[in-house]
Amino acid sequence: MTRSQGGRGGVEATFGPLLGPARTAGDGTRLVQLWALLPRELAAVFRPGLPDVAGEVVREIQRTIPDYARPLDGAFGKALKTGVQAAFLQFLDRIGAPDTPAEDRRTVFVKLGVHEYAQGRNVDVLQAAYRVGARVTWRRMAETGTRAGVPSATLCLLAEAIFAYIDELSALSVAGHAEAREKAAGALERRRHRLMELLLTEPPSPPGMVTEAAELARWRLPDRLVAVALDRPGDEPPAAATDALADLESSAPCLVLPAPEDRQRLAEGLTGWRAAIGPAVPPALAARSLRAAREALRLVDAGILDDEPVTWCDAHLSRLWLFKEPFLAAELSRRRLGPLAGLTEKQHTRLAGTLLAWLETCGNVREVADRLAVHPQTVRSRAQELEALFADRLRDPEHRFEMILALRTTP
């Protein structure tokens, strides 16, 4: 085709028969239809100006998008230039041969999305660059096509093809960005599971190994942390799991997170689950915090601790310690509370409660009466019964201490 013959008329003579009547939509996407509708000779019209247009697109992207306003060196510059040039080449190739697969260049645009994720940028930035590229490309192609005498109907189809093509490239980059994000999330999740395993290992893992694992998992090791044992799973993961190391899939789900400054906020973040929160400990003792939390859940199930949505272990340390060895707790109770064994259940409950209050208040009748909500004379009467049952043991310091422990272990 020569453009020197007849200006616009010569080009129309070439393109006019190719345009033909308007076609109806058939199978396939709109973009495929547009490739088929565009005259193949258009590729030869626009190919000579490809380098100039590509350069203008790159400059305009740098001028209008702050994230790209830096020198075109290194991986960034290569990725941007390669992407723009590949986009033009593929566009012109598909005009010239619309049925030719373009899989070889698809990877370029997928990798652009991957590159953007690696740079920590949102995919919206890249999509904005695509829009800039489409706008510049259409302006330059419209100028070139008008000078070459390309019919206005063909230019309209070309404009639609450009913007549909940019949407296609943008979708490829979005897919690449999403794939990179998913891979990174999967790798990060695996690294956090590994860190959790190291923290909950007994004996404790070497500090250097834990520190390195925390860096890989992008999880800052706190000075003190807590382990949370979970039960009664809700429909959704607890909100507290967002910033925690979490194992919600096992038969004994748990969390590890920094010791909370706001206890109420943490409790609210566990809504929907029954939870026990272990004592705050250094990272090396995380496994012990979890052991205490799981023991607290066991005592809740046994009815020894109150069944509350959240159980704080540091409010029940003595019971957790005493019930860690049930046999010894039972033996202590048998030896020190033996005199109560022959009473009826009602008598046992009444006198055991009075005995604990009496021991803990050092025999202050008024305090015992207030604690039990009874008359002081009732307290004096019960105290006489206890004197008859225990005699001098009520005044022996060691016996008094062990009786308090035994009473504390009684559900």
Image (spheres, rainbow, N blue to C red):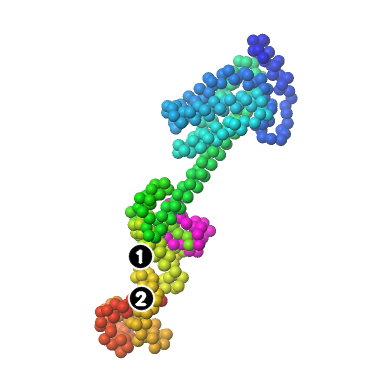
Q: Nearer the viewer, residue 204 or 352?
A: 204
- Residue 234 magenta-highlighted: yes
From the viewer's perspective, is 176 left or right of 161? left
Point out which mark residue 272 bears: none
Question: Mark 1: which secondary structure?
Answer: helix
Q: Quadrant of the C terminus?
A: bottom left
**For residue 159, above or below residue 360:** above
Q: Quadrant of residue 202?
A: bottom left
Task: From the top left corner, tell me how far across and down residue 130 is, in percent.
Answer: 53, 31
**Circle 2 is placed at which residue position?**
408
Q: Amino acid at mark 1?
A: Asp
Residue at position x 67%, y 22% from top? 40
CA gap, disc 2 and disc 1: 16 Å
Q: Which residues are magenta?
A: 228-251
**Circle 1 is placed at which residue position?**
314
Residue 367 visible in this rendered orientation of the protein? no
Q: Earlier in the sequence, mark 2 or mark 1?
A: 1
Task: From the top left corner, tell me how far across and down residue 261 is, in percent.
Answer: 35, 56
Q: Amino acid at mark 2?
A: Arg
